[in-house]
Amino acid sequence: MATDEEFLKAYLNDRQKIVEEALLRYLPSEDNIPAEIFKAIRYSVFAGGKRIRPILCLAAVEAVGGDMAPAMPVACALELIHTYSLIHDDLPSMDNDDFRRGKPTNHKVFGEAIAILAGDALLTEAFILLSRVEKVRLTAQRRLAVIQVIAQAAGLSGMVGGQTLDLLAEKTNPDLEALRDIHRRKTGALIVAAVKSGAIISGAREDKVQALAEYGMNIGLAFQIADDILNVEGDSKLMGKQTGSDAARGKVTYPSILGLESARKKLSEHLAAAIQSLADFDDRALPLRVIASYIINRKS
């Protein structure tokens, strides 16, 4: 019998391949698109991401016994939104990063203007993808519910609001609760949207949707704490980006407020809460359980 680690590796590899193939199908072709922005979009979308958000969406579908086919456009839309956010986060006016996933950031290759437009295009294409009619038809109610969940996660109450608070926090001294709010919005919101949308599109009961939202909130915070820890002590070659950048910019992080050991304890607490939220799910939720464990052990 495979260990959890072996199962996770095989599961992630399989789902990454499925998502990659779908992204190739769903992204606009080069026809009638300026070549430079076409190249910029594909450069970042296919830069080697882990595809965690679309995989979480598909894993949530599995957990509630749903069909993966109607969820695939939703999963891919989540990845387009995530990629847009990375392109914009890396800009000189934001986090000013030179590398992402071991490659020069989008604006370093294509210039700031094209990078901004590539991000704008990916966000817009995500909602085109969410609203398109598939062969597997969905009720309008479910489709609209998913669009609303993802729009809220990407907007002022989610990523945009979180990034704004993160930028403003560099000039202040936020406490732990304020930092938690930043990361709940900036990182956690889209992860919550991923698992919630998978459940909603599958017609799951409200208690299941809320349990998955609780799972997503906890692994979203755990993911960010793990990122903060890796930025202090991770291997820049494995991570594909510079470590120590948070401290150099004076950014407030979990380790800077709590210290490394207490940050690790907080990480473990969120993971335990995430696993507990799946207590009423059967073995079909195994992928969600092992993905949660992966977060605490990842090296990049």
Image (cartoon, rainbow, N blue to C red):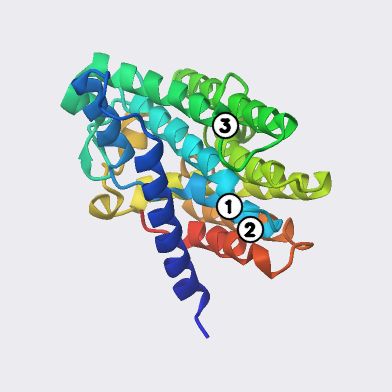
Q: CA distance from mark 1 to mark 2?
A: 8 Å
Q: Which mark is residue 68?
A: 1
Mark 2 secondary-structure assignment:
helix
Q: Earlier in the sequence, mark 1 or mark 3?
A: 1
Q: CA distance from mark 1 to mark 3?
A: 15 Å
Residue in the image at 74% along x and 30% along y:
141
Residue 104 against residue 63 in the figure, above or below? above
Tell me the residue that label 3 is attached to. Answer: 133
Q: Amino acid at mark 3?
A: Val
Image position of 113 (left or right of 280):
left
- Where residue 56 appears, as percent x and y from the top left, is 55, 50
Q: CA distance from mark 2 to mark 3?
A: 22 Å
Mark 2 closeness class: few <14, some 14–19, many ≥20 residues within 10 Å: many
Residue in the image at 50% along x and 37% along y:
78
Mark 3 closeness class: few <14, some 14–19, many ≥20 residues within 10 Å: few
Quarter occupied by residue 119 = top left
Q: Earlier in the sequence, mark 2 or mark 3?
A: 2
Tell me the residue that label 2 is attached to. Answer: 62
The residue sitting at the left extreme is 109
Mark 1 closeness class: few <14, some 14–19, many ≥20 residues within 10 Å: some
Q: Which mark is residue 231?
A: none
**Which-is-in-front pick, marks 1 and 2?**
1
- Where residue 75 appears, as percent x and y from the top left, is 52, 42
Image position of 283 (left or right of 300):
right
Mark 3 secondary-structure assignment:
loop
The residue sitting at the top extreme is 113
- Where residue 196 appears, as percent x and y from the top left, is 67, 42
**Which-is-in-front pick, marks 2 and 3?**
3
Q: Earlier in the sequence, mark 1 or mark 2?
A: 2
Q: Amino acid at mark 2?
A: Glu
